[in-house]
Every structure is written in structure tokens, then in C-alpha cells.
Amino acid sequence: MTNVNYDFPLSSISCPVSNIMGMWEFKRPPFFKYLCYSLSGHLLHLVTKGSYVVKINGVTYNVNEGDIIYYYESEEVETIGNKEEVIFYSVSYQAPSLLPLPIDKRIIPADSELKHLFNQLYTGFSSENKFSRRFLIYSTLLNILNTIGGVYLDYKDKDDENELWWAIERRIRKNKTFKPSLASLSKIAGYSKATLIRSCKRATGNTPINRIRDIRMEEAKSLLSFANLNVTQVSEHLGYNRMHEFSREFSKYYGEPPSILLKK
């Protein structure tokens, strides 16, 4: 009998993907242009036809047929097409224990095996047997994540600077501390301000202040759109001392005051 050593207890093993929100096939016409926010959680696209340019939080990527694109947690996404029609698969899933892929690994060329897995995943959603469908789609998605190196679990080494910012961001979202100072984040994390700035830029392509502002504005837009709260209540929830300060920042960020979105 061969002895196998594990670096974590077997009792802690569970499926890292808690929920698969859905999978779709989208078609985009030539010369399309979209500005939107990715879905909450994790999102994967596989381009099956065409090429285009995508900006994720201001970082530009050239996307070609056969590429997989990864998005995380309501990121600002701008897509610009060319003269070709574009077709792609999109799968959205919740996996709270998985760390996001770093900003320099958002585009992954897919080999024939990965393309087969995406087709299998898409086919799995149409299965009439609910148990079979659930087993197939979860096992296939986990296989995809393992193949692209997208399974970075929370129990990994916290001293890894690449993972530091995502741990901080999860704390911000969980505790809903939407206006922390860089000094307070440094104290909580136990790292210098310079380390936090470097980690955030490496993970998101942005500075901590701008990244936290993006998170704050995403939360504001979500609350105004879907919660039964007025502008003053949203402002207080986000930690603003004055409602006018919130309205000014919201207007600058989205190009219209929060009251307009509330009416919509």
C-alpha cells in the first residue's frame, strides 16, 4: 500500500463551485460595441468564432477565436468588434473559496480538449435528467478550471503577494467596508502600503483607491437598482458623511446623478 501525504485535511475537501448560474451561447454582429459589468462571481467565455478587443478595468486584451476569457466580480468590461461576427460560450458560477485569476492570465488559448469540455458543458444543460445534468455540468466545469489552472483555493499560502489583494477585497465585500483608508487596510492585512499597492496593481491592473471606488460604485448602482432604498440611505450604507459627496462621486463615475437611476 502506498502512503500519500496531503497538505490539508481530507475532511476539509468540498466542491469549490457552490453554484453554476447558467451557460449561454451569444452572437455579436460585426462592429459591435458594448460597455457593461460582468456578472457577480466568476465568468468564463470561450470564443468559437471571430475576434475582438476587450478592456477589463481599463486593461486591453486582443481576443481571438479559440481564446478563453476570464472575468471576476462585476468588473467593468468594454468590448469592441471588427468586421467579423463573434460567437462565444459564457458560463457564470459562484465559487467563494476560489481566488480570481491574476490580471495577466485573463486570456487563455483553448486546445481541442478544452473546446470539447465547453461543448460538453453546454450540452449538459439541455439534459432532461436533472441528476445527470447536475453531475455532468459540475464535473465538467471543475475539469475546465483544473485544466486552465483556475483552481486557486483560499487555503493557499497567504504570503503570496499575488493573492494578497484578493483576500483584502473579499474582506471589503463581506464586511461592507466600502470606504476604508489605505492605512487601515495596511494595518488589518499586516503589510506595508507599498506592498498593498503593488499587489492590487498586479491583481487588478488598478490602484487600491480606484479599485475600492469601483467596488463602491458597483454596490451603489446595485442598491439603487434593486433595493428599496433612497439616495440618502444608500449614501449612509456606503459610509459617506454627506449625501452630496456621494451624489458628486456617483455623477462623475456614471455620468448621471443617482436620483436618475432611482427613477429608472
Image (spheres, rainbow, N blue to C red):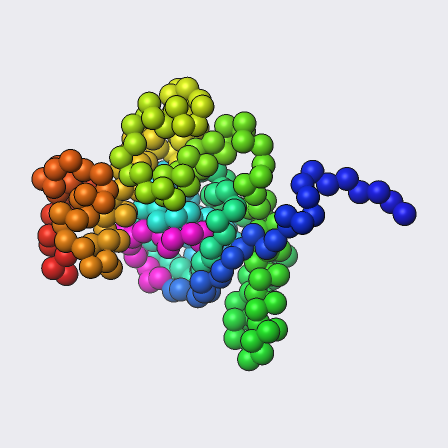
**Residue drawn at (55%, 80%) of the image:** 128
**Residue drawn at (90%, 47%) of the image:** 1
- Rendered position, 163 above or below 143: above
Q: Work out which residue is located at the far right of the displayed protein and give it.
A: 1
Q: Work out which residue is located at the far bottom of the displayed protein and give it.
A: 128
51 vs 133, nearest the viewer: 133
Q: How many marks?
A: 0
> Residue 135: x percent and y percent?
61, 67
Residue 38 in the magenta stretch? The answer is yes
> Residue 67: x percent and y percent?
50, 51
On the question of residue 252 being in view, the answer is no
On the question of residue 259 being in view, the answer is yes
Q: Quadrant of the C terminus?
A: bottom left
> Residue 36: x percent and y percent?
29, 52
**Residue drawn at (56%, 52%) of the image:** 16
> Residue 179: x percent and y percent?
27, 35
* Corner quadrant of residue 250: top left
Give the residues in magenta. 28-43
Residue 189 in the magenta stretch? The answer is no
7 vs 117, nearest the viewer: 7
81 vs 262, nearest the viewer: 262
- Rendered position, 176 above or below 28: above
* Corner quadrant of residue 239: top left
**Residue drawn at (23%, 45%) of the image:** 237
Is 4 on the left or on the right of 171, as rendered? right
26 vs 180, nearest the viewer: 180
Is 115 on the left or on the right of 189, as rendered? right
